[in-house]
């Protein structure tokens, strides 16, 4: 409708111009020169406007990729690190396991490095806002590392100092992350609007040249129309969170450069999105961060689900006796058993993750969890005897030193599955569910054989 009106007005103007006495007295050469001058003028205006608009859009998209989007990803890494510190700290204070302390030390050591990279992306005002909570956290973390060997002092300090420092810094990062995400959203919206506006104005200018009967104008119109249409579509896709855009262009002009920037931005955003997929190298199953995010999404959506924590009993003794490679083979095979059981008895939306070591998690619906757990135990019991020597298999145990250097009998490996269902509990976080599963696991380990246990109690938030 709009372009039809514009076409009619241009036709009227050209008719008036063709009948004007000054035009009728012009020679053919002068008419050609005049027509060329008009085409050249409108083309030049269109090119200048398009290049200016493209430059602004390129600058905006570059800032979004290299500063704003990257800062959001780094904030997410910092929040994940803090969450891991909190979880590992609580686990260590509860279980006093050296391997947990090693993981905690890794997280504490990695945090300042990520923080240093993060500060380089921030504006001075944001640095000042984060300075105080970070200093408080850094002091508390250092003090906690000094007290960590003393359980009672460390727990008291953790609850009184470190945990509040964690929460304060995490909340400040969450606020900044939200602010940065809003900035990105505004930038993408502005970019889309600028692209649409650039398309409309440029197309109008070139349309005038087209109605002056120049093939060059037709070519320019089609080229710009195609390019801006693809860029606008890509902008809208990125705004909606779809980073798998395809805007490859054969041209090497500014539109092609902008398309390249869009591709770089989409790939960077996709890389940042995939950076949380910390798959385990043995089982290729998603790790802690993805597991936690999946549980939190289920909790937030209100979808009923069952959280099953799978643990191998006496695995360390087996690993010490039969070696790391045999232990790794069992870790991988147990992951396959869990995946196959969930695939056979569960639904397509079910999830399997590998926390690390001999600990796994699967998420399914409450009505399917018992069938899956029973199948896992059944397949495990079939597999595990073949992993022992004939002598140990016949005896049903072997003698080995425990972690304290004391020789004692260890039975053949069993499997324990601790289950919490959201429809019979009201835990409001993945961390709370994980902590309760850890307690249930300790109870299961004291029972003979392989077992699963469903918590029928009303959970606490």
Image (spheres, grey):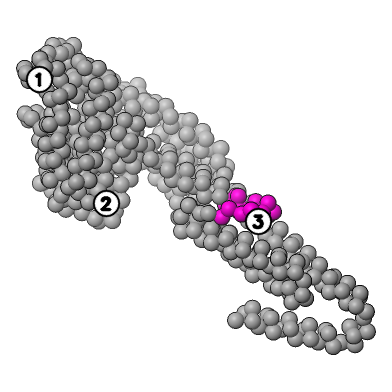
Distance between mark 2 and mark 3 Cα atoms: 41 Å
Q: Nearer the viewer, residue 31 or 408?
A: 31
Q: Is residue 374 left or right of residue 141?
A: left
Q: Nearer the viewer, residue 110 or 4?
A: 4
Quarter of the image for the N terminus: give it: bottom right
> Helix or strand or loop: what does disc 2 sit on?
loop
Reading the image, the residue beneath label 2 is 349
| Image-quadrant location for residue 94 | top left
Question: Does 133 appear above or below 203?
Answer: above
Question: Does 8 appear above or below 261?
Answer: below
Q: Nearer the viewer, residue 403 or 265?
A: 265
Q: Is residue 371 left or right of residue 163?
A: left
Residue at position x 81%, y 87% in the image? 16
Which percent across, then down, holds residue 34?
A: 87, 74
Which percent across, then down, holds residue 200?
A: 64, 70
Reading the image, the residue beneath label 3 is 255
| Image-quadrant location for residue 125 | top right
Sequence order check: which comes first, mark 3 or mark 1? 3
Which percent across, then down, holds residue 178?
A: 45, 51
Sort mark 2 into few (<14), some (14-19) or many (20+) by Cα contacts within 10 Å: few
Q: Is residue 299 left or right of residue 289?
A: left
Sequence order check: which comes first, mark 1 or mark 2? 2
Depth check, mark 1 against mark 2: the one in front is 1
Q: Nearer the viewer, residue 391 or 240?
A: 391
Count how many numbered circles sit on residues in the image: 3
Sort mark 1 into few (<14), some (14-19) or many (20+) by Cα contacts within 10 Å: some
Sort mark 3 into few (<14), some (14-19) or many (20+) by Cα contacts within 10 Å: many
Instruction: For the residues labelled 2 and 3, say whether their Cβ atoms are less than 8 Å apart.
Output: no
Whether residue 49 is in magenta: the answer is no
């Amino acid at each position: 409708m709009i372009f039809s009106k514009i076409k009619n007005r241009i036709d009227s103007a050209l008719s008036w111009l063709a009948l004007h006495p000054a035009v009728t007295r012009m020679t053919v050469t002068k008419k050609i020169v005049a027509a060329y001058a008009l085409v050249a003028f409108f083309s030049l205006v269109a090119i200048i406007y398009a290049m200016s608009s493209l430059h602004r859009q390129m600058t905006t998209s570059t800032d979004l990729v290299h500063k704003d989007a990257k800062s959001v990803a780094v904030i997410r890494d910092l929040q994940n690190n803090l969450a891991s510190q909190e979880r590992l700290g609580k686990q260590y204070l509860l279980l006093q396991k050296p391997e947990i302390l090693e993981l905690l030390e890794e997280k504490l050591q990695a945090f300042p490095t990520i923080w240093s990279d993060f500060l380089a992306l921030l504006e001075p005002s944001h640095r000042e806002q984060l300075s105080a909570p970070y200093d408080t956290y850094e002091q508390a973390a250092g003090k906690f590392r000094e007290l960590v060997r003393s359980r009672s002092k460390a727990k008291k300090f953790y609850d009184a100092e470190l945990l509040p420092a964690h929460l304060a810094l995490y909340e400040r990062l969450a606020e900044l992350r939200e602010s940065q995400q809003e900035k990105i959203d505004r930038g993408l919206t502005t970019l889309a609007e600028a692209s649409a506006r650039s398309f409309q104005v440029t197309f109008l200018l070139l349309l005038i040249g087209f109605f002056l009967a120049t093939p060059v104008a037709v070519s320019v119109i089609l080229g710009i129309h195609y390019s801006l249409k693809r860029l606008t579509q890509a902008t809208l896709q990125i705004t909606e969170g779809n980073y798998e855009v395809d805007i490859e262009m054969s041209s090497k002009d500014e539109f092609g450069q902008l398309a390249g920037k869009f591709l770089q931005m989409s790939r960077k955003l996709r890389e940042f999105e995939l950076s949380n997929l910390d798959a385990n190298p043995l089982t290729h199953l998603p790790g802690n961060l993805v597991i936690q995010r999946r549980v939190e999404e289920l909790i937030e959506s209100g979808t009923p689900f069952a959280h099953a924590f799978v643990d191998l009993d006496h695995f360390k003794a087996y690993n010490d006796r039969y070696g790391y490679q045999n232990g790794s083979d069992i870790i991988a095979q147990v992951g396959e058993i869990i995946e196959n059981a969930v695939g056979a008895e569960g639904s397509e939306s079910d999830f399997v993750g590998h926390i690390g070591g001999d600990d796994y998690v699967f998420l399914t619906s409450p009505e399917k969890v018992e069938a899956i757990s029973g199948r896992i135990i059944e397949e495990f019991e079939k597999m595990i005897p073949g992993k022992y020597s004939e002598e140990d298999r016949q005896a049903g145990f072997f003698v080995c030193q425990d972690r304290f250097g004391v020789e004692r009998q260890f039975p053949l490996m069993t499997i324990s599955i601790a289950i919490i269902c959201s429809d019979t509990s009201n835990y409001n976080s993945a961390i709370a569910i994980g902590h309760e599963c850890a307690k249930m696991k300790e109870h299961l380990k004291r029972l003979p054989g392989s077992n699963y246990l469903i918590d029928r109690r009303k959970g606490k938030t």
